[in-house]
Amino acid sequence: MRIVPEPGRIEDGKVIVYLDEKRRHTGMDLLAQSEAFMENLRGDRISMIFQEPNAALNPTMSIGDQIGESFLFHQKEKLFATILRDLESEGCRTLFPLKQFQQAVYRLGARQPDALILNLLDRIPILKHWQRKLKKEARQRAVDIIRKLGLSNPEQIVDQYPHNLSGGMKQRIVIAIALACSPVLLIADEATSNLDVTIQAQILELLRRLKQEVISSILLITHDLGVVAETCDRVGVMYAGNLCEVADVKDLFQNPLHPYTRALLDAVPKFSMQDDLKSIDGHVPNLVTPPSGCRFHPRCVHAMAVCREAFPDMTEIGRNHLVACYWAAARK
Ligand code: SF4
């Protein structure tokens, strides 16, 4: 989403996204787009659920305003069109000059929501009426989306503030904000890690349902292998900022190839009381001064001389199963 704060930067590579759900067009490299283009994309075609709902929500804004903001920023023309439709269906097309004027304003808004004339009209108090209507329509859409996410009393929730809600409810509101504009890609960064297991299961079930009904793809970032096994289709395992293995979920769990993936799976607690809890020896490296070559080499039981010298290329070993490891490639 190109929101890495300074002094962080994306040094190399491409970020290819298919903004067309049916993939009729070729993917677009987000690193080659202008900032203005990205501003329109964020929260609309691509959106994100952050780890900590308390940090993601604004404590001074009502829930309805926070969800409605997405509609007002990205879908103003749709809001104008809905209001115009309602106004016309009321049959007031020819009654008063003011109504006719309002219709003209909404018609213009449905075509050019950011037209300069609308901004000028907004400064005349008697004409501000249309802004209120836009907010009312955005609020109604917020109610609809909260209801869709399975929360009861949505009409009440839109007027509440984050401190009025429980952790699970707040996370659902963060999801509602992310889903407001029906994104093509939803990035969920540790979306369930601060929630208790029951709420976690509900949120994961919700994401699974939304994946089938609304969103084309979900990119789930997690350190919980149980969540990965239950939720994902394809998995990329990362160590110290680098991808080390990419495979379909079943293949990864049945046939892990990279020593780090194998060690991670070994470290999952087993049911049997006889098994000791296993961990990976050593420490996570400091990314300011990462180890040379393969970043996992100080902790790897299969490390060789070459591992300290150069970063291994990603190689395809098996169908759609990629791994960046000299040892795994040699065993092919
Ligand atoms: S490249 Fe070498 S150090 Fe890295 S995981 Fe493979 S064997 Fe271990």
Image (tube, rainbow, N blue to C red):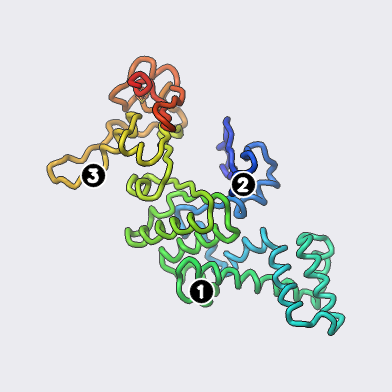
Choose the circle earlier in sequence order: 3 or 1: 1
Left or right side of 42 for 245: left
What is the residue that sits farthest to the right in this orientation? 97
- Graded by Cα atoms within 10 Å as few (under 14), some (14 to 19) or many (20 or more), the crowding at tag 3 reads few
Q: Nearer the viewer, residue 317 or 3?
A: 317
Q: Going 51% across and 49% down the picture, which residue do you hit? A: 217
Nearest the camera: 103 or 154?
103
Q: Which mark sits nearer the N-terminus, 2 or 1?
A: 2
- Marks 3 and 1 sit apart, C-alpha to C-alpha, by 40 Å
Q: Which residue is mark 1?
A: 154
Circle 2 or circle 1, nearest the eye:
2
The N terminus lies in quadrant: top right
The amino acid type, in three-letter code, at marker 3 is Pro
Inspect the image, locate mark 2, and give the three-letter code of the amino acid beneath it.
Answer: Leu
Ranked by sequence position, the earlier of labels 3 and 2 is 2
Crowding at label 2, few (<14), some or many (≥20) Cα neighbours within 10 Å? some
Provide residue 201's location: percent of width, then percent of height.
36, 58
> Marks 3/2: CA distance?
40 Å
On residue 19, which mark appears?
Answer: 2
287 vs 64, nearest the viewer? 64
Q: Read off the residue under disc 3.
A: 269
Q: For the C terminus, which image quadrant? A: top left
Q: Residue at x 44, y 33 (%)?
A: 320
Q: Position of residue 77 (x, y in %)?
A: 72, 63
